[in-house]
Image (cartoon, rainbow, N blue to C red):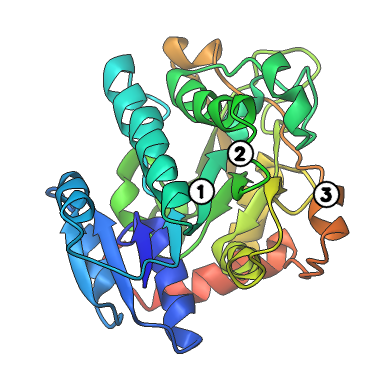
C-alpha cells in the first residue's frame, strides 16, 4: 500500500494520476479538502480510500491498515503569505516529523516535499548538499517551516534512509484551487485571453529591471516523472533539487503565454505589496548535478513548450 499525503492537491493529484497510469491503485489518499474545489482533482482517479489528514494517526496507531510500503508526503500548507507561525510549524514541521518517524519505524520508503523557498535570497547558492543546510536563511515562515524539517532529517542522519525533494516554481494542471498561490499562468490566463495586460511586480533592486527577476519554472508533468523515478528506485536517498536548472525571467513567462494564445505581448508592471518586498526571491535556479548523478536523465520541457501545453489544457477547462 502507498500513503499519499496531499493527494487531492496540486502535485499530489498529478502524482496520483501518474501512479494510476503505471497500474498502481492501492493508495490511501490523505488530505484536507476544506471548502475549496480541490475535491475535483480526485475525480477519475483510482485509490483505496480517502482520509482527512487529522484522522491518519488514529488509523496508524490502531494498526487499521497494514502493508504500507511507501509514504509519499506531499501534503503541506504552501501559502507564502500566511503569518501564523504556530499553524505552519505544526502543519509542515511537526506533522512531517511524526510521519517520518512512523515510516522509518515500519520500514516504509519515505519521500517528502521540501521547497526552493528554503534557499532564501540565494546568497548561499542553490546547491542541494545536505551539509549546507545550516547556512540557509529562508525569507518567510513557509520556507522556514520546510527548512526546519530538512534540518531535522539532516541532524538525525536520516537522509541515508529517505528522499527530500526541493520543488522550485511548479506550474500546471490541477492548481486552480490554490487561489492566490496559483502560478501566474493560471491567474493571468483568462485576463490575457480577454485582451488585458499581463501584470507583473516591479523590481525594487537596481540590478534587476522590472520583470527581469528570475525563477526556475518547472512544469508539473516533468515533476511527477522525477518523483516517480524516486518512487521506483528505493535504493536512492538524499536531498535533491527539482527544477529545470535554467532560470527564466517573469517577462519570458508572460511572453510565452501571449505566444501560446497567438497574441501580441502587453505587459504592465505594478507595485509589489510592502509586506512582500523583504521576503521576495529575485533569483532561483536549481543546481541539477546531484539528480543527474543518481541516474535520473529526464529531459525537461522548455518554458515555451510547457506553457503551450498548459494553455491547451486551460482552454478545455472552463473553471478558470
Q: Assign a secondary structure to mark 3.
A: helix
- The first of marks 3 and 2 along the sequence is 2
Q: Is residue 234 above or below residue 5?
A: below
In the picture provided, is 177 more to the left or to the right than 246?
Answer: left
Q: Position of residue 310 (x, y in %)?
A: 53, 68
Q: Nearer the viewer, residue 89 or 190?
A: 89
Q: Position of residue 132 (x, y in %)?
A: 76, 24
Q: Residues within 10 Å of mark 2 (few under 14, many from 20)?
A: some
Q: Residue at x 48, y 16 (%)?
A: 276
Instruction: Judge whether residue 233 can be spotted in this image.
Output: yes
- Residue depicted at 29% across the width and 53% down the height: 177
At mark 2, the secondary structure is loop
Q: Estimate the spatial distance between the alpha carbons at disc 3 and disc 1, rounded to whole Å.
A: 17 Å
Give the vertical position of 40 relative to 283 (above or below): below
Which residue matches tag 2? 158
Q: Is residue 304 left or right of residue 111?
A: right
The residue sitting at 69% across, 70% down in the picture is 305
Instruction: Give the CA distance from mark 3 to mark 2.
Output: 18 Å
Residue at the bottom extreme? 23
| Quadrant containing the C terminus in the rendered view | bottom left
Density class for disc 3 (Cα within 10 Å; few <14, some 14-19, many ≥20) is some
Q: Nearer the viewer, residue 157 or 271?
A: 157
Which mark is on residue 290?
A: 3
Position in image of residue 51 (x %, y %): 18, 59
Residue 52 lies, with reference to residue 137, above or below; the image says below
Amino acid at each position: 500500500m502507498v500513503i499519499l499525503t496531499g493527494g487531492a492537491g496540486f502535485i499530489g493529484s498529478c502524482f496520483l494520476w501518474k501512479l494510476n497510469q503505471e497500474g498502481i491503485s492501492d493508495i490511501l489518499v490523505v488530505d484536507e479538502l476544506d471548502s475549496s474545489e480541490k475535491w475535483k482533482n480526485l475525480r477519475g482517479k483510482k485509490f483505496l480510500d480517502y482520509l482527512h489528514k487529522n484522522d491518519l494517526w488514529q488509523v496508524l496507531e490502531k494498526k487499521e491498515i497494514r502493508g504500507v510500503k511507501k509514504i509519499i508526503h506531499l501534503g503541506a500548507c504552501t501559502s507564502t503569505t500566511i503569518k501564523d507561525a504556530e499553524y505552519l510549524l505544526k502543519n509542515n514541521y511537526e506533522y512531517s516529523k511524526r510521519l517520518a518517524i512512523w515510516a522509518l519505524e515500519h520500514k516504509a520508503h519515505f519521500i517528502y516535499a521540501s521547497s526552493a523557498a528554503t534557499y532564501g535570497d540565494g546568497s548561499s547558492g542553490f546547491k542541494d548538499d545536505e551539509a549546507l543546510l545550516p547556512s540557509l536563511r529562508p525569507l518567510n515562515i513557509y520556507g522556514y517551516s520546510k527548512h526546519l524539517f530538512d534540518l531535522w532529517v539532516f541532524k538525525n542522519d536520516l537522509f541515508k534512509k529517505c528522499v527530500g525533494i526541493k520543488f522550485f516554481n511548479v506550474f500546471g494542471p490541477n492548481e486552480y484551487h490554490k487561489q492566490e498561490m496559483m502560478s501566474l499562468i493560471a491567474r493571468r490566463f483568462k485576463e490575457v485571453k480577454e485582451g488585458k495586460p499581463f501584470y507583473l511586480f516591479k523590481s525594487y533592486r537596481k540590478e534587476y529591471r522590472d520583470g527581469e527577476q528570475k525563477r526556475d519554472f518547472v512544469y508539473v508533468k516533468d515533476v511527477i516523472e522525477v518523483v516517480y523515478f524516486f518512487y521506483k528506485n528505493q535504493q536512492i536517498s538524499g536531498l535533491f533539487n527539482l527544477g529545470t536548472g535554467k532560470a527564466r525571467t517573469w517577462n519570458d513567462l508572460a511572453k510565452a503565454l501571449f505566444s501560446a494564445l497567438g497574441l501580441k505581448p502587453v505587459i504592465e508592471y505594478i507595485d509589489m505589496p510592502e509586506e512582500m518586498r523583504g521576503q521576495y526571491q529575485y533569483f532561483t535556479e536549481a543546481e541539477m548535478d546531484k539528480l543527474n548523478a543518481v541516474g535520473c536523465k529526464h529531459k525537461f520541457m522548455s518554458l515555451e513548450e510547457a506553457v503551450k501545453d498548459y494553455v491547451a489544457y486551460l482552454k478545455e477547462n472552463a473553471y478558470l
